Image (cartoon, rainbow, N blue to C red):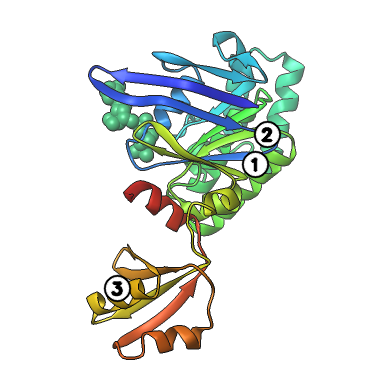
Amino acid sequence: MLKIEGLCKNYGEATVLDNLGLTAFPQQVYGLLGPNGAGKTTTINILCNLLERDRGTIEFKQQPISEKTKSIIGIAPQENLLYKSLSCEENLQFYAQLYGLSRQQQKEQVQWCLEAVQLRDRAKSVVTDLSGGMQRRLNIAVALVHKPELVVLDEPTTGLDIETRYEIWALINQLREAGMTILLTTHLLDEAEKLCQRIGILKKGKIIAEGSLDHLKETIPAAEIIIIQTSEEEQAIERGKELGYTPRHYGNNLAFWLPESKELKAIIEEFADIPIQSLTREAVNLEHIYLEMMNH
Ligand SMILES: Nc1ncnc2c1ncn2[C@@H]1O[C@H](COP(=O)(O)OP(=O)(O)OP(=O)(O)O)[C@@H](O)[C@H]1O
């Protein structure tokens, strides 16, 4: 288990981490979500001993994280840490040496990593000859070369096409099934929803909500959400309120939280005298929860 408590970091007058606490469990993917500048990378850098904290404790398997324990953590940062003129194998070999693995372990681990990220057939290809997705997979392989128990992935799929994202998701699930604890940051809420067993929402350096998706869903008291397109928005909001529905705006869309599910026909009748162009219904999802946490 990874446990962070009371983590604080200031840059001069600016508070970047403000008593941050989180708990991630083995064989689970923990998704750290938050807007730009919320403190995700700062948290990761402190966790990986790349940055000093001002206060707070970090424990993994009940041992304090320090320079000495860094071999149990593997990190794949946002920017690939690859040597472009070296091959996949040579990159992995370099990092395996850096971690002080024996010659035999280096050989075994390099092959295991190439297999894990499905780059065995590209072992001899130099990085510049790989696609963006392959480079990202190799970057994750670098984080795995010393067999870490905790893997930290900073925005592992940013900028990748959907099929390559699926490949990375499959790889992350494989690592989880192999028993690793995975902490990842992402701006993609559907990614977090599909991949993470536990989610922490970070706002201004604090975790303001944490738990499984089902647990986070309880923060929105709605059985379902309807999205209405209308030329008479004010009238629709008035009507919704009279009916006990909570109005919200999601982008340009007017939405209502319904305390109980209803037949579509019944909802249409409730708004019958208001010009409605379209009415759709959605289940509560992470996007609704995230927006609620950020804006209210
Ligand atoms: N070396 C530094 N000196 C001063 N301020 C810094 C420094 N590094 C980061 N910050 C500030 O700390 C805050 C948190 O930054 P951080 O990179 O951790 O955010 P983030 O959540 O990872 O954002 P993003 O999603 O954009 O990657 C930001 O306001 C940033 O400007």
- In the depicted view, which residue is nearer to us: 10 or 115? 10
According to the image, label 1 marks what residue?
117
Q: Earlier in the sequence, mark 1 or mark 3?
A: 1
Question: Where is 75 relative to 101, above or below?
Answer: below
Q: CA distance from mark 1 to mark 3?
A: 51 Å
Give left or right: position of 271 versus 84: left
On the question of residue 29 being in view, the answer is yes
Q: Residue at x 66, y 27 (%)?
A: 1
- In the depicted view, which residue is nearer to us: 270 or 186? 270
According to the image, label 3 marks what residue?
237
Picture disc at residue 34? none
Residue 65 percent location from the top left of the image: 57, 15
Residue 282 percent location from the top left of the image: 49, 70
Picture disc at residue 113? 2
Residue 239 percent location from the top left of the image: 32, 78
- Given the image, on which type of amino acid does mark 2 rest? Cys
Kindly report which numbered mark, 1 or 3, lies closer to the viewer in this rendering: 3
